[in-house]
């Protein structure tokens, strides 16, 4: 969804979610191509279509909200970035390099006892990598949350259980 | 002439202080009255107010100010304007903001704030008012640059009064009222994120027309949206044209004449048998400007189980929120009704249905046991109704007396009824009556309040006396927090935990202390006498009317029950309780 970048706007939106008892899985916020307008992407777990519709309508009522799209049932490009700090001894490093390769992840920091891996992709992919790395001992994970666009062509609609609202 | 225009322009572009801008903006908005209370952070505003010529009512508590503004808005249809100082002044209006938000009343509320430079430092009388009020306002602003002030005020009035009305708050740091800037109030409001839909979708209107022509048992549930849209006439015209009976929500009362043969009464927890059964049995439910509040619907699982639901509402988020809706019509109620009247369509064949409803109305009217000697609260309301020819402006608090008033004061006209519905705010009635009387100086205003609620805002008697407002304040004195007592009787084994308040002030002496005439009645005969006396006087009167303390409000849909499961429909049934 796009909003006027005004003081307190994020507060208004998250406050609305709290008030209406909706749980936010993730939020991303950033500037758009137009000055003064920001894009927010929310991932929200909902029980049914009606709830998703209600969230969209309530968001639309906010004066600072310009446009809301529920893109749950649309073909979308969704991306998330995660930094994963893994405990590794030098011996296991090579193994990790090989492991992350198919994920097109990168090592962005190397320490004596740990590595920081950066991965970008759909939330499922990020999830999968984190899962694989668990056996090495994950020290910390930082995830940005998902940001998304609808695809230029809407032929192949993906189906997600969670609602994406942008 | 041309000169004057130039002069006008020059004035608009003048550099003036923020406080002065505020005054000028209020004049441009043709604000007749402000309800407020001064304090440190709003001193510059009050200084400019001093010789501005704008009428300001100093209530004796900020809560009084905002409820008065609500009463004013409810009766005048214009936005109520409030000023409160920072910190405690602002937090004192939180209840009123929530109340106005729930009941869709247009308010523009100015709160003072500490100076920009110290915001965030826990300065004296600093409170994060925008943060506190975000969920209870339609929109809010904090002024960051004095230059924005005119634009913000203009937007605030626009937002408060258009679409679904509601309260808008403007938080003004003190330095923003003393700094100077150009005053330009001519710029048009531009809000790309706020474009309420006013006109109905033609296709949906066609669908409704079609549904009506097919219906055997249609019913209209009309809420306050009809009043906000000023659509009472259209509602009556449409109902008569299509021969569809009408039910009101608590807040909608007066939108359709209570003495009209098509009127079935109020719906919901304390609604009439006929209204609730009609909602249960109908095959087409046309909701116009009501939000399917839980006090109206009862248990949703058995609400209007046989009906196709159509919903006309200016707020799209209300449609489908609580009740699945087949025919959604996002529109102003008046515009939609005008369109429906125009379309005409084949009226529903409702003869059989209307006959059934007439039978229910006759068989199950509102009843109470009239015991000679004791003053029955229901009887009290009937007496007030008769003495005022059913034409008074009536305000109430919240509780049993409110429900009895809704049941027994048969409003014939719109905008005569002022009550706190969504929030159910005790203490609302008295200050709301002040605002209502200021909105209509000619009207007879009766404030029917509880002995409990009255004590929450009674300080506003000062204002009534000061402004010589001829309001009749009627305390329905049951020496208890009656509605709480009723629930404890019915659902908590008569364990009257903190709901009995026999320890009361002498209300007559209290009135006298405020220099207001006080009258008391302990029997029905006395009540008749003091009421007659009160209504013959063109001055404020406080009446302390003692009523039967153990009376309950019936019929009643118990919490969790469906509308068709109401109890206390017949007298004998009630005596079982
Ligand atoms: C501010 C506030 N506090 C508490 C309540 C809960 N409440 C609802 S009705 C009621 C009793 C009101 O008593 P009274 O004003 O005497 O009216 P009655 O029911 O006796 O007519 C109470 C306490 C409320 N509605 N508002
Ligand atoms: Mg009482």
Image: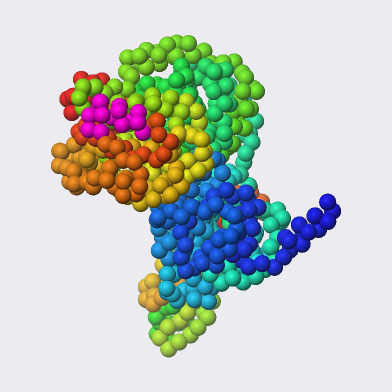
User: In the image, B208: left or right of B429?
Assistant: right
Can you give x and y, in whole percent of width and height, for residue A158 in the image? 55, 51
Can you give x and y, in whole percent of width and height, for residue A141 in the image? 43, 73
Considering every residue shown, the one lying at the far bottom of the view is A112
Can you give x and y, in whole percent of width and height, for residue A33 in the image? 68, 65
Residue sitting nearer the eye, B433 or B402: B433
Q: Quadrant of the N terminus of chain A?
A: bottom right
Can you give x and y, in whole percent of width and height, for residue B496 in the image? 17, 42
Tell me which residue sits at (50%, 28%) in the image: B413
Magenta part of the chain: B521-534
Image quarter for ligand 2: top left
Tell me which residue sits at (59%, 55%) in the image: B53
Its colouring scheme is rainbow
Residue sitting nearer the eye, A29 or B140: B140
* Image vertical order of residue B374 relative to residue A149, above or below: above
Q: Quadrant of the C terminus of chain A?
A: bottom right
* Image vertical order of residue A131 relative to residue B323, above or below: below
Considering every residue shown, the one lying at the far right of the view is B2
């Amino acid at each position: 969804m796009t909003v006027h970048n005004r003081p307190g706007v994020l507060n208004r939106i998250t406050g609305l979610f709290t008030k209406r008892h909706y749980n936010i899985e993730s939020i991303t916020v950033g500037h758009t191509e137009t000055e003064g307008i920001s894009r927010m992407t929310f991932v929200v777990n909902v029980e049914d279509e009606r709830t998703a519709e209600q969230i969209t309508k309530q968001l639309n009522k906010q004066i600072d909200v310009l446009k809301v799209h529920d893109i749950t049932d649309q073909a979308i490009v969704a991306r998330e970035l995660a930094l994963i700090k893994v405990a590794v001894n030098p011996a296991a490093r090579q193994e990790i390099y090989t492991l992350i390769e198919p994920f097109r992840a990168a090592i962005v920091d190397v320490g004596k006892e740990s590595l920081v891996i950066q991965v970008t992709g759909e939330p499922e992919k990020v999830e999968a990598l984190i899962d694989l790395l668990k056996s090495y001992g994950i020290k910390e994970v930082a995830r940005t949350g998902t940001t998304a666009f609808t695809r230029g062509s809407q032929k192949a609609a993906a189906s997600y259980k969670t609602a994406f609202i942008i | 002439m041309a000169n004057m225009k130039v002069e006008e322009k020059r004035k608009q572009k003048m550099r003036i202080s923020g406080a002065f801008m505020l005054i000028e903006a209020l004049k441009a908005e043709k604000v007749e009255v402000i309800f407020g209370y001064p304090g440190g952070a709003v001193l510059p505003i009050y200084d400019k107010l001093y010789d501005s010529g704008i009428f300001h009512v100093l209530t004796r508590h900020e809560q009084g100010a905002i409820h008065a503004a609500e009463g004013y808005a409810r009766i005048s249809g214009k936005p109520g304007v409030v000023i409160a100082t920072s910190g405690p002044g602002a937090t004192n209006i939180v209840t009123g903001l929530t109340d106005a938000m729930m009941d869709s009343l247009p308010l523009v509320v100015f709160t003072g704030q500490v100076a920009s430079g110290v915001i965030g430092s826990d300065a004296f009388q600093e409170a994060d008012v925008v943060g506190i009020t975000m969920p209870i306002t339609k929109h809010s602003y904090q002024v960051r640059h004095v230059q924005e002030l005119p634009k913000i005020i203009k937007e605030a009035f626009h937002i408060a009064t258009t679409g679904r009305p509601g309260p808008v708050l403007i938080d003004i740091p003190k330095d923003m009222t003393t700094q100077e800037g150009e005053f330009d109030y001519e710029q048009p409001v531009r809000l790309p994120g706020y474009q309420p839909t006013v006109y109905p979708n033609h296709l949906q209107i066609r669908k409704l027309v079609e549904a009506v022509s097919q219906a055997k048992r249609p019913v209209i549930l009309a809420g306050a949206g009809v009043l906000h849209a000023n659509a009472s006439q259209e509602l009556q015209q449409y109902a008569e044209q299509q021969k569809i009976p009408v039910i009101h929500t608590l807040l909608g009362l007066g939108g359709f004449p209570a003495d009209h043969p098509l009127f079935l009464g109020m719906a919901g927890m304390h609604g009439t048998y006929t209204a609730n059964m009609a909602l249960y049995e109908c095959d087409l439910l046309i909701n116009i400007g009501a939000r399917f509040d839980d006090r109206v619907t009862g248990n949703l699982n058995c609400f209007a189980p046989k009906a196709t639901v159509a919903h006309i509402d200016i707020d799209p988020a209300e449609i489908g929120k609580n009740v699945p809706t087949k025919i959604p019509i996002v529109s102003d109620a008046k515009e939609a009704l005008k369109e429906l009247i125009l379309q005409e369509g084949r009226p529903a064949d409702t003869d059989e249905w209307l006959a059934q409803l007439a039978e229910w109305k006759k068989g199950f009217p509102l009843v109470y046991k009239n015991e000679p000697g004791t003053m029955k609260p229901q009887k009290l309301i009937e007496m007030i109704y008769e003495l005022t020819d059913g034409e008074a402006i009536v305000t109430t608090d919240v509780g049993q007396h409110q429900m009895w008033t809704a049941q027994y004061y048969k409003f014939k006209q719109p905008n005569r009824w002022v009550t706190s519905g969504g929030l159910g705010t005790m203490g609302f009635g008295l200050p709301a009556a002040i605002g209502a009387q200021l909105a209509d100086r000619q009207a007879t205003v009766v404030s029917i309040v509880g002995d409990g609620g009255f004590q929450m805002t009674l300080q506003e008697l000062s204002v009534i006396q000061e402004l010589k407002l001829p309001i009749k304040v009627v305390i329905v004195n049951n020496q208890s927090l009656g509605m709480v007592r009723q629930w404890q009787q019915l659902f908590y084994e008569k364990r009257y935990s903190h709901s009995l308040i026999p320890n009361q002030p002498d209300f007559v002496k209290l009135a006298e202390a405020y220099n207001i005439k006080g009258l008391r009645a302990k029997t029905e005969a006395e009540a008749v006498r003091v009421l007659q006396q009160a209504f013959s006087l063109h001055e404020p009167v406080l009446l302390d009317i003692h009523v039967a303390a153990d009376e309950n409000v019936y019929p009643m849909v118990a919490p969790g029950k469906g509308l068709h499961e109401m109890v206390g429909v017949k007298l004998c049934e009630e005596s079982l309780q």
